Every structure is written in structure tokens, then in C-alpha cells.
Image: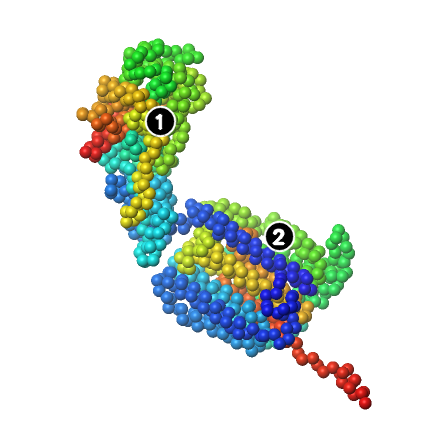
Amino acid sequence: MNKPLRRIAIFCGLLVLALLVRDNWIQYVRADELRTDKDNRRVVIERYASPRGNIIVDGKAITGSKESSSSDFKYKRTYVNGPMWAPVTGYASQAFGANQLESIEDGILTGNDDRLFFRKTLDMVTGKEQQGGNVVTTLNAAAQKAAYNGLKARGKGAVVALEPSTGKILALASFPSYDPGSFAGNSTSVDSKAWTKLQKKNNPNDPMLNRALREVYPPGSTFKVLTAAAALEQGLYKDADSRTDSPDPWVMTGTNTELPNEGNIPCKNATLRVALQYSCNTVFGKVGADLGNAKMLETAKKFGFTKEQFVPIRTSASVFSDDMNASQTALSSIGQFNTATTPLQMAMVASAVANNGTLMKPYMVDELQTSNLDAIEKTDPEEMSRPLQAGNAQILQSMMETVVKDGTGKSAQIPGVTVGGKTGTAQRGVDNSGRPYAWFISYAKVDNSSPVAVAVVVEDEKAVRGDISGGGLAAPIAKSVMEAVINSKK
Amino acid sequence: MSSTTNSPTHHTSTIGAIGAPSRRNTELALLVFAVVIPVFAYANVGLAINGEVPAGLLGYGVGLGLLAGIGHLAVRKFAPYADPLMLPLATLLNGLGLVAIWRLDQSKRLQQSSQYVEAAPRQLLYSALGVALLVAVLIFLKDHRVLQRYTYISMAAALVLLVLPLVPGLGADVFGAKIWIKIPGLGTVQPGEFAKIALAVFFAGYLMVKRDALALASRRFLGLYLPRGRDLGPILVVWAISILILIFETDLGTSLLFFGMFIIMLYVATERTSWIVFGLLMSATGAVGVASFQPHIQTRVQAWLDPMREYQLSRQGVFGHTEQVMQALWAFGSGGTLGTGLGQGNSDLIGFAANSDFILATFGEELGLAGVMAILLVYGLIVERGVRTALAARDPFGKLLAIGLSGSFALQVFVVAGGVMGLIPLTGMTLPFVAYGGSSVIANWALIGILLRISDTARRPAPAPAPNPDAEMTQVVRP
């Protein structure tokens, strides 16, 4: 009987071996995946087990932590001026997870990041409670306030301000917004109710949408800055002040349709400067058609179109199609047809022009710190691309400055400061039945360098159709944001 | 299996070791470890949860120490040549189980449950009863061959035990599986745990008598020896009983365990591979057949194939679904290689049965991969010592009984640990010695008692040869 006994022994050994292999599979190979599974409650428990680190703006915390009454969670997130900062912070809720910076920098904020390992071990040894690290942002509180209040006074929309020389995000506002503190806890009566109310299906204004980064709008005439850049860069026209070959009216290439201009403006064979000053559809439509889809797309891509940006929050990709005929390219080149951009993308366009043609990669996390403010990691400004040669950028600057000085962007003028900008009114809806979006992109220049570039979009449901124009609605917001940045530098 | 003892002879190392050391002192030394390790673990839990050495540490240490000491003294007195590893290994598992149960007793989450009872003191009591039963086995069962006389009584007892949970008013349906009976004043008992031992005795006795008939009278077909029709009878009966358990008690684990044990013993008795083929075919047919109309078993299989979906369904409040499988996987995954440390995990998220069927997940989270592998290896060692006992036993009944008991032990560990770790569909079963549950602990201590008895008989020095009457005669005739 001993031979079968030995075989049974081997069989039992195989059973144990199978268990050991399986154990290695779930506790070693798949361990990280299971440990960080978003449904694994330990992730949330861990997140609130110790006071969460803070998100910092201008040296002040815009978040906080307080002791929580919930049985599973020791601490709860609080927010200072939540609705204003929500597009920056995102939310960290015991019941509903986290997003944006609260999620991306979760490791630092909870103190569980590997880079905080030493600190964590030290705390453990000395018996101190674990403390999360801080996330220091690039934002400018005054600019953010100006942006948010400006939107609040005028309606739905978004504002993005950048520092052209570095790519630092100075303001990132979206309206209507929400208070992430209203559902930070875990109670069904308070937090779940607040959460449900904010969902898009219950609230058509969709307050939780980060319009500055995640919504794409048709850019309208502000896109003409990019088209002008393409005309200069691709060698179609050499400077701002020579006459262009632009009939008015212009029948779009390959069609019988005339491309109209808004109002009675001097667009026939207008120079690029004049065309931008009056926002001539005929001139820039024809520039687009003359360059063709491929060349326009090439320039658009250099400015960051067609790709998601990570700032580090992921943005939507701005759209410029690659399969258009001449007339579609013409329409796209004046910011209509398929062209759609995030407010951040248009701020990047203004920023690249202001920075003499060099586009810096936009970012909003300046530094990661331990709980006692030692730097762990500092973000260095990084060049993203060079969509314009310096000479061409300066030509474009002078054109945009003319727009503010003598053209459609007069309401953005700041005494003693050189401002360049471009208005836009983007039509939407079938046969332009929807209320158009008011756009304004601009930059300010002090002592020959530019401290700020800004993009503003306002979608105002209340405004009368005729009232909506980039110059009237959006430019004043851009102006106050630029002023806030300039004043805070003094 | 190669020899792990010091004996120079291979395979027969424990047979006929005349004058071989009894190894009782080895056992005592190992027992010290088996008691000290859980005591440290217990202190560790207290320090992690409350920041202080738990007040019950002394009581717990003394309790476990006494159990081990009494067990050891009984073995020393009544089974001096018994295997020296089994008692320490079982004590270690029992001690660690107590620690994990006590740790889960401290869980605030579980304390909120209406079913919460402080389980650790009860488990200590059950362990004491179990060791008492072990001692009783050693005292009263002087020779395991005595059990052979009770072959058919064992069969009857096993059947009664198996049917008990189905008796109206006595049985208790706990979350789908009907394997408990309620005894007023005493709580619930899982008769299946005891039936396991009774069945092993019956199979051993029956197969010892019938093995020649089963092995030799067969026809060869396609390289396999086909059994005769009438020899198939007993197998069909056991198979039918397994299927009936599956249908009426909806307990896949017990069913698999009994049938598996029978096939193992049948194979050992007849040395015919064909029986294994038949066994596998029949169990596969049975399981698939029953699963096709038993919703409870279908749910279990689906939960195994897609635990995440099962979790979502359970979250949405769909009746009959459980999030436990996924929760157990998260517990294991969150433990990682070294675990969170005792008392610092969240395995109590599993909720119901966290301290019984799912207790391995607590070890997984708090002691990590290292801890679980160690525990699995301890089980492996117990099984290995059991198989070695079977190899060493001198009589076929002892061989069959030992392999039956250790084989079913191995299968049970595989079924429950594999279920909790998501290797196979989950079935309600307890992890021997570790999981909370009186029936399981008591029955498994009895099982160890019987194995100790068989190994004692096997390793005992052969009695001095009786004077040879023939030799005497020769001398008488000499003048």
C-alpha cells in the first residue's frame, strides 16, 4: 500500500503548493492593484487616518483638516473659500472619493508617498502621529479672486491666467462652482444630499465641471491670433503692415458661399494688423484656406492643440481637425466649424505670443513639501515648444496691442501698461440660435517682459444676443485679473 | 517523500525502529515555541490596538500553556512513541487562531453587528474540550485497531450526523448552507466535522475487508481496470450521499471532502489508478449536475469568477449576493508581503464570518504573504506527518485510517483556504484549529488524537520476540 500512499503524499503536497502559488499571486503579484483599488475601503480609511496635508496658495492654506465624528475616519477635509478654489483643489470626500489635486497628490497629502518614507518612519519611531505633506501651488490669490468674482458677476464661464515666462498657472476659475467642503464627510443626510444636488442630472448648470480645463468651447475670433501666427510662421505673409491678398466679399474656395464679415469693416486687402484690429473673417478665412489644413494643423499642434495637457490635472484635448477641405479649413481658421478649445489652450496661445514665441509647459504645482515645510520636489519651468520665431512673435504682439489700443479690445486697457489682446464671439447652436460665447485673450507687458497672459470665456444665458461680445463681457474680467497680477508683483 | 528523521534507512525510517528515541523531549521543546509565539502575538495585538499589553495575557498564556502541557503529559504517558511534531503544530495553529479571534473581538466594526459575541473565551473553552477529547482518545483507545470493530456502527453514526441538520426543528440554515444543528442551551453544532472522523473509520474498516475484491476482480479496458458492476455499488452509494448533501444541505465543501476522502482511501486500498479517474469523473458530473439547478451554488461560482461584480451587486442590495469574497481579496492584497502588523489591518470589513470561514484573510492582511505561507506550511507539515504515520503503520487498517484522516485534513485546508483566496469557489468550511467554531476545534483535536495513537503504535519498539517453541523442542531432543 505504500506506493499509492506516496502518491497521495505528493497530491497533498500539490494542494499546498497550489495554495502557496495562489497566495503569492494575490499578495505579491496583484497586491498593489488590490491595495489601491478604488472600491477598497482601506484607501479611504487611510486617506483620512491622519491630518491631511494642505494645498497652499501664496503661503496660505486653502484647505484644512478637522477631527471627524465618523467611526471609520479620524479626520475630515475642510476648505477655505471652497467654490473659488474648487477648480484647483478638486474634492476629497470620505464618501465620494477624490479628484484633481486632492487625488493626484494624494500620496503626498496623506503622507504615504515613498518620498515621505523617511519622515513617516521617523514619526513612527518617535510616536508622533503621521502628518501629510503640503502641495504648494503656483496660483496667485488676488488674480484668482478677480477671476472668480468677475465670472460671478457676469455668468457661466472660465478664466485661466498664466505666467508666460514660466508656464505657471496664476488663476484657474470656473463658474458656477461648488463647495467641496459640502460633501467632504460621510453622512447620508448631509453629504450625500449635497453631492446628489450637484450632479449634472440634478443641476443643469453642472457646477462640478471644471470649465477651465475640461470644457471645450468654439474659440471664435480669438483663434485668429493663431491663424495670424500660422500666416507669419509658414511664410504666407512677411509682416503686419503689408497688404494681404483678400477680396471682400470672399467666396470660400471650392464653394459658392460668401464668408461674411460682421458689420461694415475695412477688410478688402487689409493688412494683418488691420484685419486683426477689426476681426476680419474674410482675411483670416482666406489665410486658412491658402495655407491648407495640414499647415494650419501643424501650427495649432505646436500651440498644444489635439493633445491632453497634464498640469498635472488632466485637461481635455483642444480640437483642430485633420480632414477638412479648403472651405472647412477657412471656417476653422476663424474659430468656427469643428475648432474647439479649452480656456487653458487659448491662454497658452496668448502666453506663447507674449513670451516671444516660446510656449512654456503650463503647471500649477510649484513644490511638494513635507509637513515641516522641507522641499521634496520643486517643479522647474519647462519649454514645451516654439510655435513662433521671436521676430514673428513680436510682430504678432504689436498687432494684438493695436487691438487693445484702437480695436475691439479697448475695455482691457490698463493705464501705464502695454496690453495686447483679441476678442472673440463664438456662435453656437443650429443656425447660431444659441447664445454665443464671449471670449477674450490677452497679455500684459511691464518693462518689456510679460507677467501674465489670460483667457476668459463667458457663456451668459441672461445677456441679450447683441450685447455679447468679447470686448464687452470678457475683456473687463481679463483686465482685472491682469491688474491683480501686476499689483501683486509690486 | 524522503525521510526527515535521522534514521539511516529510507522510507521505512519509522518502521521497526527498535530502541528508537521516543522524541518526547523534542515535542516538549517545540511546544514551548508553540505557546510562546502566540503569547507574543497576543501581546502584539493588544499593543497595536490599545497601546498596552492586554490584561488577559497571563490568563491566555497560562491557558494555552496548560492545554499544551496536559496534551504533552498525556502523550508522554499513554502514547510515548507518538509523532513529536503533530501536537506542537496543532497547538501553534490553535494558539494563533485564538489570537486572531481575539483581535477580531476588538473590532469596533464587528461589535456593531447584532450577531457579535465575544468569541475568544468560547474558543479557549472549545480548545480545552478538544484537548480533553484528545487525552480521552489517548487513554481509552489503547490500540487503533479496536476501531475496526465499529466499522458499521461508524457508518450509521456518520449517516445520522450528516442527516441531523435536515431534521426540522433541529437544523439551522445559516446563510444558505444547512450544515448546522441547534442544541438549545449549547448553541450550534456542525455535525459534519464529527462525521468526517466516523466516515474515515468506516471507509478504513470496509476497504480493508473488500480491497482484494475491488482490486483484483476487474476487466481491462483502454488501459484502465474497470471495476465489476457489483463492486461499484459502495462507491455509487457514497457518491449518491455526497450528491444528496450537496442538494439538501447546499454544502459543496462537505460533499467534496467526503467524496475526496473516499477516493483517496479507495485508491490506497486497491492501488488502482482507475478508481481516481472514476472518482474525478463522478464528482465532476455530480457537481456540474447539481450546480445546474442549485441557485446557491451557481451564485458561489459566479462570485468566484467575478468577485467584483458580486461586490457591486451586493452593494446595490441585490438579494443573495455577498461582498465577502472581494473583501477577502482586498484584505490579502492590502497585506502585501509583510502585512500591516497584527491589530492594524481592516480585515473586519469582511463582516460576517470574519473570524471563522474567512479567518485566513485576517492573517493575510496583518501577517502578509510571509505569515500566510508559514501557516500553510504548518498545515502541510501536519499532513506530511499524517501521511508518514500511514506509511509507518504496520496494519492496513491503520494505514487506511491515517491516510483518510490526513487526506481529508489536507482537502479541508485546500477547500477553505482556496475558497477564501479565490482559487476555487468559496464553500462554508472552517480552517482547522484556527477558525472560530467549537465543532471544528473539538473534532480536529480528536483527529490528531487518533493520528497520534496510530503513530505511537507504528513507532513503538517491536515487542521482544516470543520464545520460539521450535527452538525449545530442538533442545529437548538433544540427548
User: Mark 2: which amino acid?
Assistant: Ala
Q: In the visual, does B180 lie left or right of A407? A: right
Disc 1 designates what residue?
Answer: A386
Quadrant location of the C terminus of chain A in the rendered image: top left
In the foreground, B123 or B36: B36
Distance (Cα) linking label 2 and label 1: 68 Å
Q: Is residue B273 visible?
A: yes
Tell if the residue under mark 2 belongs to the same chain as the one under mark 1: no
Against A219, is A3 above or below?
below
User: Mark 1: which amino acid?
Assistant: Arg
For label 2, the SS is: helix
Question: x and y percent of residue A115 in the render?
Answer: 36, 47
Question: x and y percent of residue A152 in the render?
Answer: 26, 32
Chain letter for the residue marked with disc 1 in the picture: A
Disc 2 designates what residue?
Answer: B287
User: Do the numbered discs 2 and 1 sit on residues whose CB atoms are within 8 Å?
Assistant: no
Residue shown at 52%/64% (left/top)?
B433
Question: x and y percent of residue A414 in the render?
Answer: 20, 25
Q: Quadrant of residue A445?
A: top left
In the foreground, A247 or A301: A301
Residue shown at 46%/46% (left/top)?
A33
Question: x and y percent of residue B308 in the render?
Answer: 49, 46
Quadrant location of the N terminus of chain A in the rendered image: bottom right
Against A28, is A214 above or below?
above
Against A408, is A175 above or below?
below
Residue shown at 62%/72% (left/top)?
B459
Residue shown at 33%/46% (left/top)?
A109
For label 1, the SS is: loop
